[in-house]
Amino acid sequence: MRTEKRNPPRPFITSTLQQAANNILGFSSRKTMSVAQRLYEGKDIGGGEVVGLITYMRTDSPRIAEEAISNIRWYIDNEYGEKYLHKEVRRYRAGREAQDAHEAIRPTSVNRTPDSIKKYISRDEYNLYKLIWSRTVAVQMAPAQVKRLTVEIEAGDGLFKATGAKIIFDGFFKVMPETRSEERELPDMKEGDIVALKKIEAKQHSTQPPPRYTEASLVRKMQEVGIGRPSTYAPTISVLLNRKYVTQEGRTLIPTDTGELVADMLVGSFKDIFKVKYTARMEEELDLIEEGKENWRDVLSKFNNELNRYLKGAEKRMEKIKKEKEVIVDYIKCDKCGSPMMIKYGKGGRFLGCSAYPNCKNQKPFKEENGKIVLLEELYKDERCDECGAQMVVKGGRFGIFLACSRYPECKFTKSIYYDTGVKCPREGCDGTLVEKKTKKRRTFYGCSNYPDCDYALWQKPVKAECPKCGAKFLVVKGRGSNKRLVCVTEGCGYETEYNGE
């Protein structure tokens, strides 16, 4: 048993605000900056005038103005008492690479508490403002004091160990309760106590690959390696999503076939230019130009020379990489000319195209099932139009593939194509199943196939597995990477177990 102090985190800069908003509120980087912009530009909070609620949100400096620090410390002393005020003033300086043009992201007045302005702002604005306000106040608060416990339990020849904590003094946890929840608290115990066995749960652990990036972890990585500036983190991620180089499943970013192809082609053809260190070097050179230490013409001339050298061979290399990816599927023939179909790549991802192109321009959408290529039109050949009864056909559009009536334009009925999880909708009296869907912003969720008659939906992926505790017919996947768990969503159940799926 030992006692340790937990210090509050540093004030927000752009990258850490985006990370916290993603992890705690589920905001994308773009949404975080959009909401922060509204808070910065100002709101009418009852006085008839628009008041800016936070400082400028594009910053890489954790510095807070001295006057603001004095006001924050006065507020803590008066609101929470002297024991919650850190004895020394905490000041943070910007790192060597930071521009330090603006101070940290903080409330313009600490006296404007989140609850005092809640009725004047939207829910998103309130949640983000509360996050910023709490972090700013926490910086000048006393550390939390935590007693670390290690409990060893003997059972026959076995020795079992549990670690946890007991919070002695909450300190800055008082304004940042989400930090407190990270501590797993153990009950009071003393040596010699006899504990009853509740259950045995065997867990098999194997080496896991690194977890996929979320927006939060990608922003953190970009900051670590020197890619971009506070103003470019959110737009960079938006480009990846808008061009469908990656998709989102929950908060996880998953590369698409198109994204992987583009990465292979660009990295293979512009090897040095697409190295992380090259991008960071360019950022440094731009700073030197701004400071008047480099001539912009010289920097651009050097870049153009390098780029032209790569461009000479890039087209041939790209064509070679693309052809290596385009595989002939000899067991599927073109229904127009009889030539074998082949996997090709376009803006929307992979598709089957006739190998006789350009003489034949036939195209077909497909999916892989158990390592075999299956035409979507074969999967949906029995689908009938809900309005006229004609056969439905697979079509491609701006947002992907869908089913359309074969009698178009006489009948304009369409239907989305969804991945069916096979999990029955849990809502009483509903005979639908839970299918994978996308929001307008292309975020994955799972909803009932009988929508709009049934609006049951959830963010987590459902898995067809019975809960051994309450008998629920499905569990959901929570967590990321090696921390993925199967969890029961039945209220009050609390069952969870390890997840070994994809």
Image: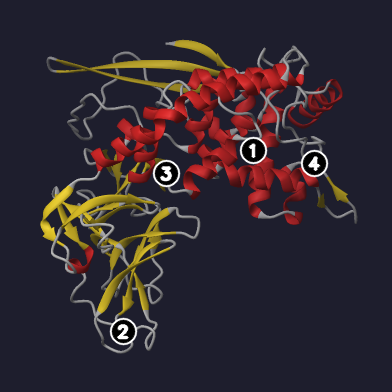
Q: Which residue is mark 3?
A: 245
Relative to 35, is 210 above or below?
Answer: above
* Tag nearer the camera, 4 or 2: 2
Which of these two is toward me, 319 or 28? Answer: 319
- Position of 31 with respect to 387 (left or right) is right
Q: Residue at left 68%, top 18%?
A: 298
Q: CA distance from mark 3 to mark 4?
A: 42 Å
Dot 3 or dot 4, earlier in sequence: 4
In the rendered structure, are the residues bearing label 3 and label 2 in contact, judged by CB atoms less than 8 Å apart?
no
Residue 131 is marked as 1
Q: Which residue is mark 2?
A: 386
Dot 4 or dot 1, earlier in sequence: 4
Dot 1 or dot 2, earlier in sequence: 1
Residue type (three-letter) at the residue carrying disc 4: Arg
Element type at mark 3: loop
Residue 112 is marked as 4
Instruction: Residue 399 in the image: state x and y as whole percent.
Output: 43, 61
Instruction: Residue 17 in the image: state x and y as whole percent.
Output: 62, 34
